[in-house]
Amino acid sequence: MPTAAEVTGILDQTQAYLTEMLLPFWLENAADPEGGGYLTHFDQQGRRTADTTKTFLMQIRTLYTMSSAERAGYGGGRCAELAKLGADFILDHYWDSEHDGWIWIADRQGNPTCWDKVGYGHCFGVYAFSEYYLATGDERGREAALRTYDAICRHMIDFQHGGFIELFHRDWTPLEGETSGGNRKSLDVHMHMMEAFTTLYEMTGKVSHRRHLQEIIDLILAKMLHPENGLGIAQFAYDFTPLAAINFDTTWGRDADPEEGNEAKPLDQTSPGHNVEFAWLLLHTADVLGIPREKYAHILQATCNHCVTFGLDHEYGGVYADVPMDRPTTLTEKQFWQQGEALIAMLDACIVLGDDTYWDAFLNLYHFVAEKLVAMDAGGEWYERLDRQGNILDGDLAHSWKINYHSVRSTIQAIERLRVLAE
């Protein structure tokens, strides 16, 4: 394992990066002085673009980012101010008072342009507003989190098969058609629902919220992980029959054109980033529930071992986006968010499992992010996609579905774990 001096050196560098570069970039640039809420489109040089679309996901994720940074003690009060700015805008413009739930996309002034109800976004409605209340004490955050939870329970729960239906029209009728995603369930949404309900329970302490959270954990472990290797399966039919994953037609505000359209991916393809993200979130949930981490240590070990063996690029650094479950990948693209989630998980593995393998993996990721992914001359946010060698494929720092959520959260969470290792 690393020496205290080695850990402290990286800790100091990471804290300086967060407090002197990454967080100040968003504190100075996120607010929209004209329309309210946040502007979320920045090019490779860190400049605002002409696109002023405001997706619910980017507004709510920035609300989470500012709330979590405030709660962690950063920003000297400015994070709380920006969080309130976002809460005001979201509460004023995105709630559908006729059908319940949050609308998906609005223009700069908050006028709805896409009324679809997206389960993924509702996860973050619970998550961000719970975090906002815990950070600021604003009762509107508590009320909004509970209102979102109520909408989820009334409209998204699949009472026949369990879990959640995910993609809907405005009136909560599931989207039709194979490629709409309305007839599928995903590990992604269920994992984020676990994440959201963890903070909800942290906020309320209610037995019913604890019970619902435990039900989600049990469902994921029983039905959404491969029974032999413990790795995540991406998509399912309503009855949790595994399906080869496809790209959905749902409007997310911006999507890279998939090279193969909606062609199904191999059933044994998995996301090392999602796998290890689920593992570290599960440990955090265990902490909040008062469950010993040892109960879920085997999940952390299985996902991190697979990530190190098949997900990690030992030559150029970083984690691949998608890989087979049992052999090396031929798809070598690297996306921003997997790097951040793997950084956190490898530090958790160092702490819980105590193996040098995970520290070496952390160093691999740390140097790849610092040297290739961070836009050092453009505010410190992360580029979206790189090739295997770290050359930029998509350099935009933020847009309609990429924002500060992964970069800032990863840095804050890494600092917390580095402090534990340093001690």
Image (cartoon, grey):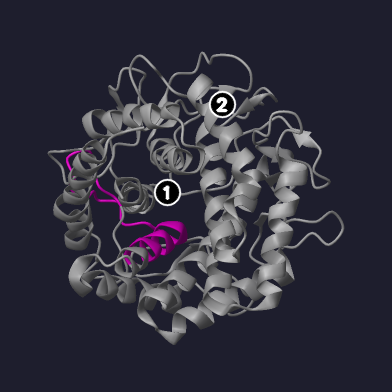
Instruction: Name the residue carrying label 2.
Output: 306
Q: Is residue 414 above or below residue 269?
A: below
Mark found first going from the N terminus, 2 or 1:
2
Q: Nearer the viewer, residue 371 or 294?
A: 294
> How many numbered tags mark residues here?
2
Q: Is residue 51 magenta?
A: yes
Q: Is residue 165 magenta?
A: no
Question: Mark 2: few, some, or many residues within 10 Å (few <14, many ≥20)?
Answer: many
Give coordinates of residue 170: x percent, y percent: 63, 65
Q: Furthest residue to the right? A: 160
Q: Quadrant of residue 223?
A: top right
Question: Mark 1: few, some, or many residues within 10 Å (few <14, many ≥20)?
Answer: some
Give coordinates of residue 148: x percent, y percent: 59, 72
At 14% from the left and 53% from the top, the residue drawn is: 20
Q: Is residue 311 above or below residue 249?
A: above
Q: For the residue marked with disc 2, what is the amino acid?
A: His
| Magenta-tinted stretch | 41-66
Image disc number at residue 142: none
Q: Nearer the viewer, residue 238 or 101?
A: 238
Instruction: Name the residue carrying label 1.
Output: 401
Q: Is residue 304 visible?
A: yes
At 43% from the left and 78% from the top, the residue drawn is: 133
